[in-house]
Image: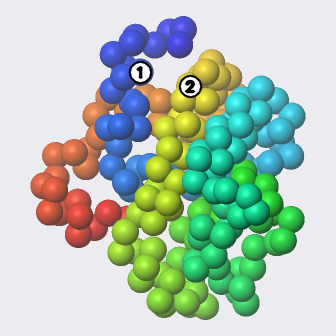
């Protein structure tokens, strides 16, 4: 991308991220509204990337929701039926689970499963990379518009602080 040296791009690639950073990236993406994103190139690139990552793991008649249904909170935080058919709403689902995980009404068994391992990253292994690469194409837009300010840190990470922690420390506290 213009204005960014190649080594900075390489060093900010999700390959160098911890699971925690990858999940935080997906939660950040889940904060954006589908309608707004669908009206611009950046959003359409992102939506396309999510569709691609989900398509690799889901065969019809399944949807993304089939893969994560065990984490649904039907009483407190139900996923709307029409969202279950649109891969983009996987980002909303991930965001909602992470944001509400410590709510009193959240099922303790689901919370424990989510805290135990990076289940969303394991279930959709290319989601983070595909989304990051799609947004990299639109880095100038991300830098120029305030509504994308939360995304900037994911493209200017010369060093991942978690990488200096021991593997044992990281495995005990991935989230």
In the foreground, 56 or 154 = 56
Is there CB contact under 8 Å for labels 1 and 2? yes
Q: Position of residue 24 (x, y in %)?
A: 48, 53
**Model colouring:** rainbow
Q: Which mark is residue 136?
A: 2
Residue 120, above or below 137: below
In the image, what residue occupies the spot 76% across and 63% down?
A: 61
Q: Position of residue 122 (x, y in %)?
A: 44, 59
Residue 99 in view (yes/no): no
Q: Position of residue 142 (x, y in %)?
A: 63, 28
Q: Position of residue 13 (x, y in %)?
A: 40, 31
In the image, what residue occupies the spot 59% across and 63% down?
A: 94
Q: Which residue in the protein does label 1 denote?
A: 9
Quadrant where the C terminus sits is: bottom left
Residue 128, above or below 72: above
In the foreground, 52 or 150 = 52
In the image, what residue occupies the spot 71% across and 64% down?
A: 62
The kind of secondary structure element at disc 1 is helix
The kind of secondary structure element at disc 2 is helix
Specify the farthest residue to the front. Answer: 60
């Amino acid at each position: 991308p213009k204005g960014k040296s190649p080594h900075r791009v390489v060093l900010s690639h999700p390959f160098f991220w911890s699971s925690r950073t990858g999940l935080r990236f997906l939660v950040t993406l889940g904060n954006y509204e589908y309608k707004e994103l669908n009206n611009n190139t950046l959003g359409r690139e992102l939506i396309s990337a999510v569709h691609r990552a989900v398509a690799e793991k889901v065969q019809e008649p399944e949807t993304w929701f089939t893969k994560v249904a065990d984490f649904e909170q039907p009483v407190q935080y139900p996923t709307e039926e029409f969202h279950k058919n649109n891969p983009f709403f996987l980002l909303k689902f991930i965001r909602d689970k992470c944001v509400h995980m410590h709510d009193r009404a959240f099922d303790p068994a689901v919370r424990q499963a989510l805290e135990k391992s990076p289940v969303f990253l394991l279930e959709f292994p290319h989601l983070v990379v595909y989304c990051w690469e799609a947004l990299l194409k639109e880095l100038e837009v991300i830098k120029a518009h305030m509504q994308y300010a939360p995304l900037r840190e994911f493209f200017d990470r010369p060093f991942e602080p978690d990488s200096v922690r021991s593997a044992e420390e990281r495995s005990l506290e991935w989230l």
